[in-house]
Image: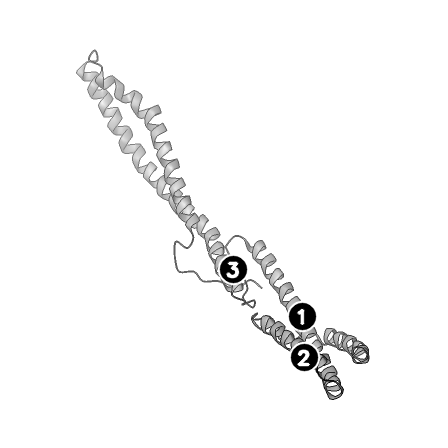
Amino acid sequence: MIGLFQRRQLFVHPVQYWCIGTTLVYVACLLITLYAVIFLPMVQPLYDPAVSWEQHAEVASQFLELHSRIWPWLIITFLALLLHSLYFMHRIAGPLYRFSTLFRSIGSGDLHQRARLRKHDYLHREAQAFNTMLDSLENRIQTINLHSALVTEAYEAVAIHVQAQAHGQITSALQTLDEEIRRFKGCLADFALKIENMPEQQQFEFGVSAQKDLPAIMKAA
C-alpha cells in the first residue's frame, strides 16, 4: 500500500533545476519578443530628428505609461509560472528521488522496502507496479529458501546413512556438497525479506514433494 512520504527539501532531483532553467529561458524569449513587437516600434520615433519635441514628449509619455502598466503584470505572471513549475516538478522529482533511494537499498539486498509516495505526487501507478514486482520477487526468493531448507534436510538424512556405510570418495563428495549448500544458503541470506513465512498450503505441498523424493534419493545413495 502506498502511504505518505514526508519530504522537507525543496530541491531533491536534478530535473528540478532543468525545469527552472527552461522556464527562465521561455520567459526571456517572451520578453525579447514583447520588446521587439511592442516597445521597439514605440521607441523608434524618439530617434527621428524630423519628429517635433511635442511628439517626442507624447511618445515618451505613452512609453512610460505602458511600462507602468505592463511590467507589474509581467512580474506577477513570471512569479506565478515559476511557482507553478516548482510545484509541478516537485510532484515528479519527489517520487524520482524516492525511487533512486529504493534502487540503492534493493541493490544492497534489502527487499522489504516499498515505494511510499505522498497523496498528490505523480507516478503512483509506477510505484504500485514497483511494489508488486518486489512482492513477487520476495515470494520467489522465499520459495527458493524453502526449497533450500528441504534439500538440506534431505541431504542430511542421506548423509547419515551413507557416511555410516562408505568412506573415501563418497565422504569427500558429501563434504563438497555440504559446502556448496552452505554457500547457497549464505547467498540467499544476503536478501532481507519482508515475508517471514510462506502460506501453510504451499509449505505442505513442498513438504509432500520432498517426502516423495527422499526415498528415491536414499535408494540412489
* Furthest-top residue in this view: 50
Element on which disc 1 rests:
helix
Is 52 situated above or below 143?
Answer: above
Report which quarter residue 201 is drawn in. bottom right
Residue highlighted by disc 2: 172
* Furthest-bottom residue in this view: 164
Left or right position of 84 against 131:
left
Asked whether residue 70 is in view, the answer is: yes
Question: Which is nearer the N-term, disc 1 or disc 2?
Answer: 1
Left or right position of 24 against 118:
left
Q: How is the image coloured?
A: one colour
Element on which disc 2 rests:
helix
Left or right position of 17 against 189:
left
Left or right position of 72 against 219:
left
Residue 103's label in the rendered image is 3
Seen at 22% across and 14% down, the residue is 48
- Amino acid type, label 3: Phe
Which tag is nearer the camera, tag 1 or tag 2? 2
> Residue 131 location, x and y as percent?
59, 61
Seen at 62% across and 67% down, the residue is 138
Is 82 situated above or below 110?
Answer: above
- Badge 3 local density, few (<14 within 10 Å), some, or many (20+)? some
Asked whether the residues under the numbered discs 1 and 2 touch, taking CB atoms below 8 Å apart as contact, a structural biologist would say no
Distance between mark 3 and mark 2 Cα atoms: 42 Å
Element on which disc 3 rests:
helix
Which tag is nearer the camera, tag 3 or tag 1? 1
Distance between mark 1 and mark 2 Cα atoms: 26 Å
- Amino acid type, label 2: Ser
Residue highlighted by disc 1: 144
